[in-house]
Amino acid sequence: MPKNAVIAGAGPVGLVCACLLADEGIPVTILEAAPDLPRDLRASTFHPPTLDMLERFGVVPAMIEQGLICPDWQFRDRADGVVATFELARLGGDTRHPYRLQCEQWRLGEMLLARLKANPLADIQFGAAVVEVRQSADGIEAVAALAGGGTQTFPGAFCIGADGMGSVVRKAIGAEFEGSTIPEIYLTLSTDFDFSAAMPDISNIAYVSDPEEWFVLIRTASVWRALFPVDAALSDAQVTSTQFAERLLQGAAPRAAPYHVLHRTAYRVHERVASHYVKGRLAIAGDAAHVNNPLGGMGLNGGIHDAFELAAAIAAMLRGAPPDRLSLYERRRRKVALDTVQQTTLRNRAILNTRDPAARAAYYADLRRTVADPAAHKEYLLRTSMITSLRDAEKAL
Ligand SMILES: Cc1cc2nc3c(=O)[nH]c(=O)nc-3n(C[C@H](O)[C@H](O)[C@H](O)COP(=O)(O)OP(=O)(O)OC[C@H]3O[C@@H](n4cnc5c(N)ncnc54)[C@H](O)[C@@H]3O)c2cc1C
């Protein structure tokens, strides 16, 4: 029986799985469809327990150096300003990193890749798109279409599908991707304008609620990123035009000079969870298993938490644990995706875009009560930082 794992996808989740398994002495083959790691702007929020977990790879000091520590974050009303500011220092006894770190996800990817390249147990194949996965009682075979032409078959004991939203491994498992797609498109604009000049009391992370046009402002080490929901009926040319960006940014913080937009990304947002994560020797993690809106920064973090649980399960099985260990992975992590990630991000979206004045007032009153009460404030932070979901998952049998 082979003693290695084949991982489809070299996104952050696949790379974390690969590092964990290779560190356990388990050979890994990573098959990545793209010619190299992309440097596009995607997630940038790392929650406290994720930083605690990533410490073992020795990458956190460099992430902190390249990123921006955010000690608090806010809900604001577009017209009236601060509604509630959540202070992560209150988690000092629960984590070694009582803050959110803003650091672009590609930076972590590059650090993990460099680490894997130095490990002879890791074989990384770029330009290798998994097109089919087969399994038998003894192992798996992943068939990859190679960028240079032709296909190659990679055998292994297990196959991890960390191949993102369109996962081939999820399809091989036969899982449905249950949920829906948000009607709007999300547009992220990065600018060198300092929003704290316009809103002196703004946190580095601010969710700005408005019945007509909500937005999110997130500061990184070098820029501010502004996220806006936009009408999906608009053409790509309209959505990515300079005039459109200018109108949105002037709406967020009016100023005499025009905005200088450094990057823009427009993407469709889905809220879906796979009907199951495991079949025999195949398992999915990260965006392959669940996708959500980015309001709360839970997708990437939840995916990394999956990676730790899944790598532990596979390492245990290669050492003789019964097959139920992989089912435990599914029970633990699918529950988190449904009960924490989807629920929190759906609620965040509701707080931001609810039009009904009474419902809006009720959300605000609830947030204000929560920050004013030390126990409720801390409980909220434990939940939104994903510490509670990790603790609950550990208890699940
Ligand atoms: C455009 C965009 C913007 C985003 N912005 C935000 C944001 O602002 N905030 C936020 O919290 N989250 C954001 N996200 C989500 C966040 O990036 C993901 O949650 C995170 O990347 C998940 O990591 P992953 O490793 O599971 O999947 P991915 O990062 O998607 O990695 C999957 C990898 O698998 C590879 N692959 C795909 N198919 C195959 C195949 N058949 N064979 C081999 N390799 C394959 C892909 O090339 C990719 O490298 C964004 C996502 C996108 C797409």
Image (cartoon, rainbow, N blue to C red):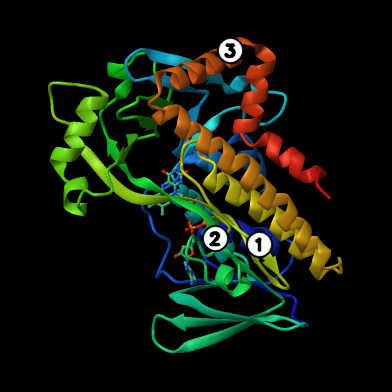
- Closer-to-camera residue (309/180): 180
The amino acid sitting under disc 1 is: Tyr
The amino acid sitting under disc 3 is: Arg
Quarter of the image containing the N terminus?
A: bottom right
The residue at label 3 has a CB less than 8 Å from ligand 1:
no
Disc 2: CA contacts within 10 A as few (<14), some (14-19) or many (>=20):
many
The residue at label 1 has a CB less than 8 Å from ligand 1:
no
The amino acid sitting under disc 2 is: Phe
- Closer-to-camera residue (358/336): 358
Residue 174 in sight in this render: yes
For the point 58% across and 58% down, the residue is 289
How far apart marks 1 and 3 lie (CA) works out to 38 Å
Name which quarter of the figure residue 78 lies in: top left
Q: Is residue 52 left or right of residue 317?
A: left
Residue placed under numbered mark 2 in the picture: 177
How far apart marks 3 and 2 lie (CA) works out to 37 Å
Q: Disc number at residue 277? A: 1
Q: Nearer the viewer, mark 2 or mark 1?
A: 2
Residue placed under numbered mark 3 in the picture: 369
